[in-house]
Amino acid sequence: MPSSSRNALLRINLTQQTATTEDISLELAAYIGGMGIGVKLLLDEVPAGADALGADNKLIFAVGPLTGTSAPMFPQTCIVTKSPLTGTILNAYAGGTLGPEIKQAGYDALVFEGAAAEPIFVFIDGKEVSFHPAANLGGLGTSETARRVRRTIALPEARVVSIGLAGENRVRFASALAEHRVFGRGGAGAVMGAKNLKAIAVHGDRPVAVHDPGVFEAAVGAAWALIHAELDNEFSLLGMFSRHGTGSGMGLVNERHVLATRNHRFGHFDQAHEIDATAYENVYPTRPVSCFGCPVHCGMLRRVRDGPLKGLFSRGPEYETMYALGSNLALSDREGLFRANDRCDQYGMDTLTLGAVLGMTMEAAENGLLKESAGLRFGDPDSILGLIEKIAHRDGLGDILAEGPARAAEKIGGNAIDYAMQVKNSGYAAWMPRSMKGTGLSFVTANRGACHKRAPIGVEIMGFVDGTTIENKAAIVKEIQDKVNAYFTLVSCRFAEFVLPPEIGLQLLEGATGQTLSDEEFMQLGERIWNLERVFNIAETFGRKDDLFPAREFEPIAGEDMDAPQFTRVEADSMLDEYYELRGWDADGVPTSACLEALGLADYGKRMALPGADKTNR
Amino acid sequence: MRIHVRFAGYYRTLAECASLDLELTESATIDDALVRLNEMLDGRFTKVFSGAGVQRGYPTFLTLVDFRIVDRKVTLREDNVMAIVPPMAGGCQ
């Protein structure tokens, strides 16, 4: 019977420059796709203590059973690898059209292992895999790299993932770009750089069939109806994203006093209206761009018509970047922010962790902790753009900052670590745990560090749950982590979960592959993957000691008219205790054997018993 | 009593300021404040809200008092900070 899954993975050995196709085993297929099979493969194939930037680490691109089909909002591709930024397991996502191309090339996953001796790019053209020298692409930006790769293979329609200078220089928060979409978090770009893999081009022409067209089309119709109803409502969240991009909610976040400002000291940015979606639309001609088959088209492409940036054509900034390089750095210079966002895309750098690094650096400079701090100040676009250049080139202070916020703060010394808004060296996302304690618990317990993709942001912002108390937050966070992990096996857009209930996803899965799962089984799969990730991290010597809030979280939010919510270490400990207990973990955050057994993961207990990992890459 | 009003998004343009202070009678509600605000700003908010409350057919907006989203029947107190957030700035349900 046909299935939308290929049941095939392509294994590419970069050291030997060979490629082999393998069947996906039934055991692996039980993890459906995306991060499910990626996490399982990484656990099974990468030894504990492997150097994230070494040849032992693997870089896995995984798609899902709905990728490349007509199911709306399932266009993404997932990268799973060991993160050089955090030392934990990483899953990172990008939309666009890469995923469907991988599927049309005939694969559910690409596994890159080893490392090339010299810079190369790899071209996957269906069953043919070729290796090309890429020394001539060294130092080029991500867009220019993609252009030249397409020209070299003489295939304009090929999809390309590329890294920029940051990845080549192994900046620990380097990203990889798939056209206008970014695998942002955790340093997947540095892993590519360490493997001397400048780019990957993919081309395929095999149609994607589904198992039961009747069941599948009915589920697609139901999904479209729900999405259209949401988009028809002009002022629904998804409707606003569709018309104006993700930056359209900034006013509410600001008025709720949870828009992190000046390195999370304040919760309100007086100039927020200068850098929100409306502000950009008013100045720059803007048009939406969508991922494969997505009716939401939340990406916004803008062109600069005059001034110093005349001719610049770039996507964004997205909401999280408006925070990270905007309010967080007190930057209200719209053009400067647009420029900084574009430089990050071209160098290939995660704007969220960059924002945390720069916030820490500017506050350290304000407090006299830096020797090389002349002119560095909040709100100054030249300071920000200058540091981006230094980090990408690993020049002077930039070489220290390229290590990520916590590692850089340790090198700077003094109390700089108190200014580093991070968890496990991964920079915070846009939200303020002092007023959103559930979101805070999500940050500290996230397996990839400070993750906002599995956090109760919406319900806390809207006041559906009181974000200022710790009550019931452990249960809310566990539920959303498991649920999103389950969804991510289908490699959905994060916004799909806003509008599509799990049963729609499961109907789509059944129609596409014939695989039937109950809601409970689906949620348990999410929980199983969450625990597998935790096992990986425990074997890398992570535990409760690393599930920590930055010191700033226990200070009041500054502001003259703010009756600030307080957050105490006792509350933080209490939330963690409750969360670990709900998960079936011990007081140190280690999954118990009973927990692993109940989830069918008993064999993985052995991995946690291995000797402590090498911490040089943490 | 006196409260402080903050405008987000397009309402800032409409009001021609980011914030202002408003004098109200004791036990006034948010709806009362909106009516008073419209009068004070020469009817510039008539399209959005009037004496009858929110204009029919106009998209809803969110009102916040002291940084929490609240219903418009809520009674205000001296020194409250009331914010009005239009849909385009995230003020939608």
Image (cartoon, coloured by chain):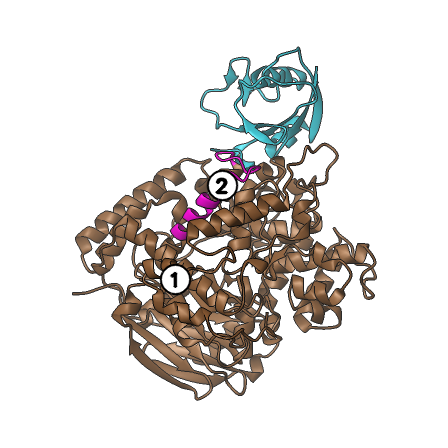
**Residue range (magenta):** A462-483
Q: Chain of mark 2?
A: A
In percent of width and height, residue A78 lies at 42, 63
Image quarter of the N terminus of chain A: bottom left
* Residue visible at 37% across and 83% down in the picture: A19
Provide the residue designation for mark 1. A593
Say which chain is brown: A
Query: Is A97 contained in the magenta span?
Result: no
> Do the residues bearing badges 2 and 1 touch, measured as CB atoms within 8 Å?
no
Residue A409 found in image quarter: bottom right
Q: In the rendered view, would you say A450 is above or below A565?
A: below
Q: In the rendered view, would you say A269 is above or below A320?
A: above
Closest to the observer, A73 or A402:
A402
Left or right of A14? Residue B17 is right
Say if residue A334 shows up in the picture: no
Mark 1 surroundings: few (<14), some (14-19) or many (≥20) residues within 10 A: some
Q: Tag 2, which secondary structure?
A: helix
Q: Nearer the viewer, mark 2 or mark 1?
A: 1
Provide the residue designation for mark 2. A458
User: How many marks overall?
Assistant: 2
In percent of width and height, residue A438 lies at 52, 44
Say which chain is cyan: B
Left or right of A12? Residue A140 is right
Q: In the rendered view, would you say A314 is above or below A112?
A: above
Say if residue A253 shows up in the picture: yes
Q: Tag 1, which secondary structure?
A: helix
Closest to the observer, A447 or A109:
A447
Circles 2 and 1 on the same subunit: yes
